[in-house]
Image (cartoon, rainbow, N blue to C red):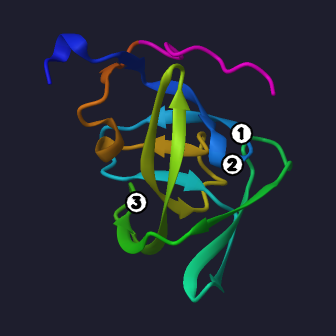
C-alpha cells in the first residue's frame, strides 16, 4: 500500500470499543510492541456452548475505580514478553476498535496494566498497513463524543 494513502495518527489516541459498551479508552501507539494489549484487572475463564470464553473486568479510565465487565470468546492463548522481558501466558480476544473514522478488528492480549500510564497499547500487528505514526503528535483522530 502506498504510504501517501495511509492516515496519520499520533503516538497516543482515543479509541472507542463498540463491543465494550462503546467505552472510550486512551491508547498508546507502541511500534515496539508486536501485539496490542488491554488492561484487565480481573479475568475469569468460563465455558459457553462448550467453547472457552473470558469475563473481563476493566478500568477504562486511568486513576478511576469505575469498572466495566465484558465477555469475549477466547481466540487464543499466547506467551507474551513485556517491556521488562518477563514472559506471561495471556488470553487473546478479538474486538472492534474505532480510531476516529477508522474502524477495524484487532487481537488484544489481556493483562493487568494498573501501574502503566495507558490502559491499552496498540501494537505493530494492528498498525501494519493501516496507519503512519507521527511521534510528535497526539490525538490526531480527535476525542470521541460522550455517549
Q: In the image as oriented, which residue stretches furthest toward the right?
A: 66
Q: Which residue is mark 2?
A: 20
Give the residue displayed 30% in from the left and 29% down from the top: 130
Q: Eyeballing the image, is 25 above or below 59?
A: above
Q: In the image as oriented, which residue stretches furthest toward the bottom?
A: 50
Give the residue displayed 63% in from the left and 73% down from the top: 54
Give the residue displayed 23% in from the left and 13% down from the top: 5
Residue 31, picture quadrant: top left
- First of labels 1, 3 by sequence position: 1
Real-space Cα separation, disc 1 to disc 3, in angstroms: 25 Å
Real-space Cα separation, disc 2 to disc 1, in angstroms: 6 Å
Q: Eyeballing the image, is 112 above or below 144?
A: below
The residue closer to the viewer here, 142 or 114, is 142
- First of labels 2, 3 by sequence position: 2
How many residues crowd around disc 1 within 10 Å: few (fewer than 14), some, or many (20 or more)? some
State the extent of the magenta-drawn residues as a range. 137-147
Real-space Cα separation, disc 2 to disc 3, in angstroms: 24 Å
Mark sitting on residue 82: 3
Label the magenta part by its dominant secondary structure.
loop
Image x and y of residue 47, in percent: 63, 86
The answer to if 111 sits in the magenta stretch is no
Query: In this image, 3 relative to 22: left or right?
Result: left
The answer to if 145 sits in the magenta stretch is yes
Dots 2 and 1: beta carbons under 8 Å? yes
Give the residue displayed 13% in from the left and 18% down from the top: 2
The quadrant of the picture occupied by the N terminus is top left
The residue closer to the viewer here, 98 or 84, is 98
Amino acid at each position: 500500500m502506498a504510504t501517501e494513502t495511509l492516515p496519520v495518527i499520533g503516538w497516543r489516541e482515543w479509541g472507542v470499543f463498540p463491543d465494550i459498551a462503546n467505552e472510550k479508552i486512551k491508547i498508546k501507539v507502541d511500534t515496539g510492541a508486536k501485539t496490542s494489549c488491554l488492561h484487565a484487572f480481573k479475568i475469569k475463564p468460563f465455558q459457553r456452548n462448550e467453547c472457552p470464553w473470558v469475563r473481563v473486568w476493566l478500568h477504562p479510565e486511568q486513576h478511576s475505580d469505575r469498572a466495566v465487565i465484558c465477555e469475549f470468546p477466547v481466540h487464543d492463548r499466547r506467551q507474551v514478553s513485556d517491556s521488562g522481558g518477563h514472559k506471561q501466558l495471556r488470553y487473546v480476544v478479538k474486538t472492534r476498535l474505532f480510531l476516529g473514522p477508522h474502524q477495524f478488528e484487532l487481537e488484544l492480549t489481556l493483562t493487568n496494566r494498573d501501574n502503566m500510564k495507558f490502559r491499552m497499547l496498540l501494537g505493530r500487528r494492528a498498525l501494519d498497513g493501516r496507519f503512519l505514526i507521527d511521534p510528535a503528535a497526539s490525538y490526531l483522530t480527535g476525542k470521541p463524543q460522550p455517549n
